[in-house]
Image: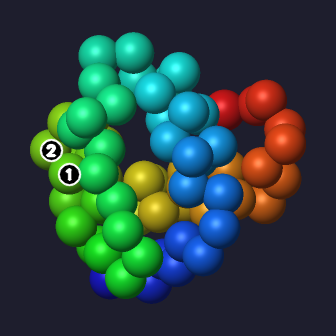
Amino acid sequence: MEELVITEGWERIKAKILRRFNHIRPGQLNFSPGKEQELIDTLHQLTGLPRPELVFMIRKMQVNLNNNRL
């Protein structure tokens, strides 16, 4: 499985995820550093998207945290 590391900007990433998937509630996205795989598993269960696609999406969101693009 691809490795994902979220070191900073989680709140902005979370906001982008919540905007993209409006059926997910903030309380469903609990994250702490080092628990990236659990986050991917949760997102997989909530969205049904494949894990590699979720990793790609989050990495893309990390590239420019100030960008409003989803």
Tell me the residue at 47%/63% (across/down). Answer: 55
Q: Are marks 2 and 1 in contact (CB under 8 Å)?
A: yes
| Apparent side of residue 10 relative to residue 27 in the rendered image (left or right) | right
Residue under circle 2?
Answer: 45
The secondary structure type at the circle numbered 1 is: helix
Mark 2 is surrounded, within 10 Å at the Cα level, by few (under 14), some (14 to 19) or many (20 or more) other residues, namely: few
- Numbered badge on residue 57: none
Location of the C terminus (image quadrant)? top right
Location of the N terminus (image quadrant)? bottom left
Please tell me which residue lies in front, 44 or 7. Answer: 7
Please tell me which residue lies in front, 24 or 44. Answer: 24
Q: How is the image coloured?
A: rainbow
The answer to whether residue 51 is above or below residue 17 is below
Where is residue 17 shown, x and y percent of the image? Answer: 49, 35
Q: CA distance from mark 2 to mark 1?
A: 5 Å
Where is residue 64 shown, x and y percent of the image? Answer: 83, 53
Please tell me which residue lies in front, 49 or 58. Answer: 58
